[in-house]
Image: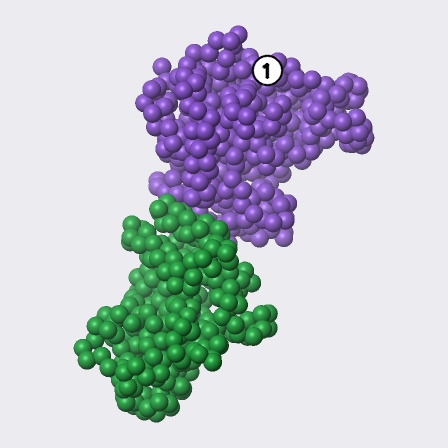
Chain colours: A purple, B green
Amino acid sequence: MERLAFDEMCEASAVRGPYADVAEWLRQASGKELAEKRAEAEALFRKRGITFAVYGDASGAERLIPFDVVPRVLGAAEWSQLRAGCIQRVKALNAFLDDVYGAQEILRAGIIPRAEVESNPGFCQAAKGLVVPRGVHSVVSGVDVVRTGPNDWYVLEDNLRTPSGVSYMLENRSAMQQLFPALFHRQKVASIEHYPDQLLAALRSVAPKDVDDPTVVVLTPGSYNSAYFEHGSLASRMGVRLVEGRDLYVDDGVVMLRDTRGDRRVDVIYRRIDDDFMDPEVFRPDSELGVAGIVGAARAGKVTLANALGNGVADDKATYVHVPAMIRFYLGEEPILKNVPTYCCREPEDLSYVLDHLAELVVKEVDGSGGYGMLIGPAATKEERADFATRLKDDPDGYIAQPTLALSTCPTLVEQGIAPRHVDLRPYVLAGETVEVVPGALTRVALREGSLVVNSSQGGGTKDTWVLEG
Amino acid sequence: MTPRIAGNCFWLARYLERAENNARLLRMAERHSVGPDAVGDPVGLFGTALEVGGTLDDYEERVGAIVRDDVIRFMVHDPANSSGIVACFHGARDNARTAKPMLTDFYWEAINGVWLEAQALDETKTAAMGVEGIVAWTIERCRLVRGAAEDLLRDAVPHVLVLGESVERADFTARILAEMLPPLLEGGVDAPPIGSPLSRRWKSLLLGLGLTETWRREPGSELDPVAVLSLILKHESSPHALRVITQKMRASIEGFAGPGQSESRETARELERLVNEVDVDSLARTDVRPFMVKLTATTNQLGLDVFRDHFA
């Protein structure tokens, strides 16, 4: 049974401050007008080719991520807290990564059990001794956040490997400005268009030392990857080359880019390829996506990989429970953003609790993503819970569980008109010389009534996210 | 740009040109089919269209007898015919998608928009449009995309696009000449009587090559075979004349690859020499086939050399 969720537009039948203008707009706009605009948005996205492919879809068809024309609005003060919390969190996670692949102080201090870290599938031996300029292992981080009340934000998970979705944040804004310019005349919506500039600055700031004018590239697995549009979009917006593994080679320890006018050195690689496929000499020997010898070049400090190898040890759900401790240990601060209370099934007591309370909990794979491989207890059938219980007993180390949160809702255009739908938020944190967050994020919305699954690969949509200035 | 992306741009342009060439072949066959020469000859020039497009064998194996409606369906819609018009737009768009960061948003949206329209075309719609309608639609869309190249950076990309277009155009020209010229020249080197079946066949050739208007502007334009052949091979300003095509190919290789030596440059120069040095008068009076074979072979070789030298 669904608990009453916090509605971000209306509280106790009154429109909340940040939504004043949007609420007035929704009152005046007819359902027909909004539906026409939604169709226009869809045509716009199709024309721009903002599509993705779903892994495992035999047809290979390109799909649009449904876009909702009703923006999510955050006030300046709300954003300020979120921003500070995300920056704090990423600083601590970067410090953890630098430590765990270096001096391992946090392990020596007993804050996190050594065995947990070193047996983590994301812990990468090849990352030990890697030259990581400024100690920034995660240049681009996506912090997934949910809300249960006006000031109650919880981090669901950290994404430090190859977080995606930022191009949708940018394209959604562009679409809204084109479809509803009058809305932007009424209120000051903070700009996000400088994200690519900040990204490029962050990438350049982590170039190998003694490189004055670094060459940055975006490394993609190729056009069949579901996020290919984003790879190309970011490369274009930054004015850098989009390359595949076969465009690069290592010569005398230096990464070179093939070019019709003469090959050239590459200094920073914004890589959107998983660790396992990066270098056939170190990881999967059958990988055709990576570059032979690239890890050697990174270890020698001749090229920077962003994000660095081995970040998976910091962004899986087992390590997640330790992030508040990391913040205290490395920064000497109290966490601004809360973790969701989490039961680690590898702990016998937690496993016992979880098995007894499956109907109330959300159970997730420790290294899962995309909303796959999870159980939403309250929405599951008795059989599904029984099946999951078997899986938990077979592999307790592989799962964590959390209480279901009553995720906040935002007004969303659905078939019946405007209705509340659950949302989450992914701000993108950029770390380089400084740590920055553009005033905006990707809001993902679960389009089905009552659903908590926001992932695009499972039918979720997105919204433009406005942060009001002043 | 990387050789890989250059290859995508090359094929993007080849597919667009191929779509337009196939559209012109369809127009040529259709106009012939509604003229007096086609009465009692339902195959008409539809077989020629398939032969020039290099798809006759595939058609006969999968479809069977050459029937107008089936040929139209095959040349426009058949997804297994990679040279079909819709398939060509798909190929162009697929390559553009990979090369997208090297293109402008406007160029990408132009080609993606055409692809979306092509995806929505079905046999009912093309039947309603008619052959002339589908031909006009195809050529307009190709020109729209080419026009969008106007504000591409004048670096390597435009040169590669021109090269791809030129290689495909040269290849097409060689094929159509190889197929249609020998039987035409069997009629002799005197201009055929105005309005005769032979004159209509010469006009079909010009239509297929996109040279009808160029021909009309030539002074004293009787359909003198030597004059027509001279126009096709040596006209100095028509973009569909082989002389201009070969010049563009050579210039575009130098444009994107810079100065230097390569087999593709050598083959491009060889092709240019072949066209510049041929004595059209002698060619028209002797067996034209050896020249056609050499032209076709050199054009094919150029495509292979370009890919190997620059895009592999």
Output the chain of dot 1: A
Quadrant in the picture for residue A445: top right
Residue B25 on image: x %, y %:
41, 70
Is residue A73 visible to the viewer in this orientation of the structure?
A: yes
**Mark 1 nearby-residue class (10 Å; few <14, some 14–19, many ≥20):** some
- Tag 1 residue: A5
Query: In the figure, A45 relative to A327: above or below?
Result: below
Is residue B8 visible to the viewer in this orientation of the structure?
A: no
Query: In the figure, B309 relative to A214: above or below?
Result: below
- Give the secondary structure at mark 1: loop
Residue A26 on image: x %, y %:
44, 20
Which residue sits at x=56%, y=75%? B65
Which residue sits at x=51%, y=64%? B73
Instruction: Please tell me which residue lies in front, A93 or B312.
Output: B312
Q: Quadrant of the C terminus of chain A?
A: top left
Residue A371 on image: x %, y %:
63, 32
